[in-house]
Image (spheres, rainbow, N blue to C red):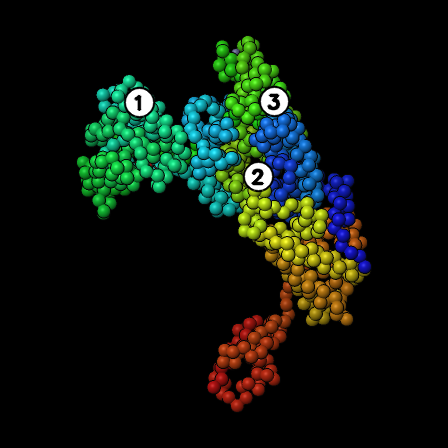
Amino acid sequence: MNVYKPNEIEPKWQKTWEKNEQYKTDTSDATKPKYYALEMFPYPSGKLHMGHVRNYSIGDVVARFKKMQGYNVLHPMGWDSFGLPAENAAIKHGIHPDKWTMENIADMREQLKTLGLSFDWDREIATSTPEYYKFTQEIFLKMLEHGFAYKKKSFVNWCPSCETVLANEQVVQGACERCDSVVVKKDLEQWYFKTTHFAEELLQDIDTLDGWPEKVKTMQKNWIGKSTGAEITFDIDGSDKSITVFTTRPDTTYGVSYMVLAPEHRLVKELVDGTEYEEAVDTFVAKMHTMTEIERTSSEVEKEGMFIGKHVINPLNGKKVELWIANYVLADYGTGAVMAVPAHDERDAEFATKYNLEVVPVINEDNIMINSEEFDGMDADKAFEGIIEKIEEMGRGKKTVNYRLRDWLLSRQRYWGCPIPVVYCEECGIVPEKKENLPILLPTDVEFTGKGESPLTTSKTFMNATCPCCGKSARREADTMDTFVDSSWYFLRYIDPKNTEEPFGKDAVNNWMPVDQYIGGVEHAILHLLYSRFFVKAFNSMGMLDFKEPFKNLLTQGMVLKDGTKMSKSKGNVVAPVEIIEEFGVDTARLFVLFAAPPERDLEWSDQGVEGCFRFLNRVYRLVDELSDLAKVEATLGDLTKEDKAMRYTISATLKKVTEDLNEKFGFNTAISALMELINEMYKYKELDNRNNAVIKEGIETIIAILAPFAPHMGEELWTMVDKEGSVFDISWPKYDETALVKDEVEIVVQVNGKVRGKLSVATNITKDEMEKVAMEDEKIKALVEGKTIVKVVAVPKKLVNIVVK
Ligand code: ANZ
Ligand code: ZN
């Protein structure tokens, strides 16, 4: 008798796989259909956590299952290795970010390898290596060339603690996503990607993503936030200047009783300069900069504003109304200006009440226009179109759509990111680096103080550059790219990781994209997924590839919780994967995270659950060990007893269920519980005196194949225990025997006056009459109906017979 020793068999199989290059993918092999399985690559923090174990275990089952189903599977892994923690380590411990990062990668790679994942390590990439960021820079230059990257000055989100700007997407409820500090607005010149160029496509194409969770699609739609309305231009009284507003309610234009500019609106300063309002406006604007967007627009917060001494003229009725600035109007939405209609807008109403401003209703309760000149009496919906037409005829505006989506602010005042490959030349202005000069390497003579400007400005070797255009000395761009730039194209690089000429070969990515299954945390539902979709659309429009969406199917896995909250260092409720692996082996850890909850749900950690999985694996091991001699020899089915048929039914039904669960809906937990039942049935069946060797063999082989994707080390071990050659992952996923699924007997229920009185086994194909006859002949039923009048008998095939008596 052998004993299950995961600590012996797991390292053994990992070595064998590595030696045999078991998971190396030949992407040029077109004899099999392709399958690209991808898990979001990790930031190399140095420590593997349970979230990783869950994410990669899910992906590994998918990859192994698809391989066994005959696909050419690509399953790569790499590192999202630029980022702030490395720089903070440099500031704190004086260790260079590159060294810190590379050591962490080495550590984490070793930890990942103990999980027995089927990654093709030959394709490993790290975004902080010059081999990779050379192409991130090349992509930036391409974007610049095509007008998809540009520089502009505007009010941007500034995190005072990280001392860097943040993209809108990185501000969560007015706070820095990373450090939680309150984000303030700063007027700075920054680099942007033109995500808004694809706003409509990004929105429309969401409907093609059938394999994405609805909730993620909704989040993306809301983030893009399309609203339809009009832009209307109001002249400023006594000036040649005008102000354009964006409104979703052109039908209310006759009801405008004042206008509001965002305090940061470019015109404000100009309009009040040298007037009696100047000082008060400056104070007000300064105060606004200390408030977050959330604070400013929250319905809880009191509306606040001031008149700035000017009036604007309503183009429709010539009415002069006051011009105000207020906290509730944002600079970067629409045009940063609002035509206020307190009769029909709640925010305006609140403001008008506070400051005693006029309220002019223009639509009555029946949705009919009033106080609107020639539109009076018209349905408001019709007036919506009518007023837009009139404004367009007058040349005072147009129908327009507005998106909440902003361009992606990509520059960061950080060191540990991809340098932006441009220089500033006094003669030539902003000049892109020449492609042959890439990569622009990060310098090593940098001081990390955590204060002030971008650390790159402290490096003389870096800052002093030559203008690629005129050859004179120039200053290099000191900002680096947001790390989301790195992760917006890594899935393409995996397909062609050794390409030294270009980021990726066009044919290669056309053949292998989209990713068939992408798996990662729901926290990336907006940022990373939207940016990656934008990159693919930009690449497509630049002719670099032919498809439009990167990820065909998306699974967003839930969190790993302990005692009801997310495992985290700060809460002190972390279970380290290594502890579990040392005690029970990695197959147990994998089985637990796959079994304890459906993948998209949160998973509550349970020590008993882990022990249960360990016991289950032991039970499988003992079963196979005991029956291995039988499973080794050839046998024929021959005549089958009722028990043989029942066992074969369970084997095939389990296989069918597991296949369906894995194919369609990530039913890992239900697949595993079906396997558990099969094991129970096998334990009973093997005790029979007249057990059939061929059935035993079929059962054992099926069990091993089903178990293998979940517990791959044990799968391989059991496979050799039954004398099979080669890897269990080189076999085809077994096909279930349809004929075994046809039961020739079913159990039916017999009722008397609706009460269940007995169960009978009958042939599946008997008629209703025969069913009734069998029921009436049953001894127990006979006794129950004796001496009574039979009113009627109802038979439902394969289900029941009901006898009504009086
Ligand atoms: C007049 C009006 C009348 C409005 C009415 C609404 C109701 P969504 O749907 O989110 O796109 N708005 C425009 N720009 C703004 C800004 N920068 N900051 C704050 N509010 C702004 O909202 C569009 C509406 O929000 C616009 O339509 C405008 O107010 C306001 F009965 O114009 B409305
Ligand atoms: Zn120059």
Q: Give the quarter the ligand 1 occupies.
A: top left
* Residue holding disc 3: 442
Q: How many marks?
A: 3
Write the residue at 55% across / 26% down.
450
- Vertically, is 56 above or below 595? above
- Vertically, is 426 above or below 540? above
Determine whether the residue tagged by mark 1 lies in a helix, strand or loop: helix
**Residue 672, horizontal then vertical, whole percent:** 64, 56
10 Å crowding of disc 2: few (<14), some (14-19), many (20+): many
Of the numbered discs 1 and 2, the one sitting upstream in the chain is: 1
* Residue holding disc 1: 279
Three-letter residue code for mark 1:
Glu
> Relative to 343, is 549 on the left or the right?
right
Residue 340 appears in the rendering: yes
* Residue holding disc 2: 514
State the residue in front, 259 or 406: 259
Query: Could you say which disc has been placed on residue 134 in the image?
Result: none
Ligand 2 contact, mark 3 (Cβ < 8 Å): no
Determine whether the residue tagged by mark 2 lies in a helix, strand or loop: loop
Of the numbered discs 3 and 2, the one sitting upstream in the chain is: 3
Q: Residue at the bottom extreme?
A: 787
State the residue in front, 441 or 227: 441
Three-letter residue code for mark 2:
Pro
Residue 29 location, quadrant: top right
Residue 50 location, quadrant: top right
> Relative to 214, is 464 on the left or the right?
right
Labels 3 & 1 near each other (Cβ < 8 A):
no
* For discs 1 and 2, the disc positioned in front in the rendered view: 1
**Residue 378, horizontal then vertical, whole percent:** 22, 42
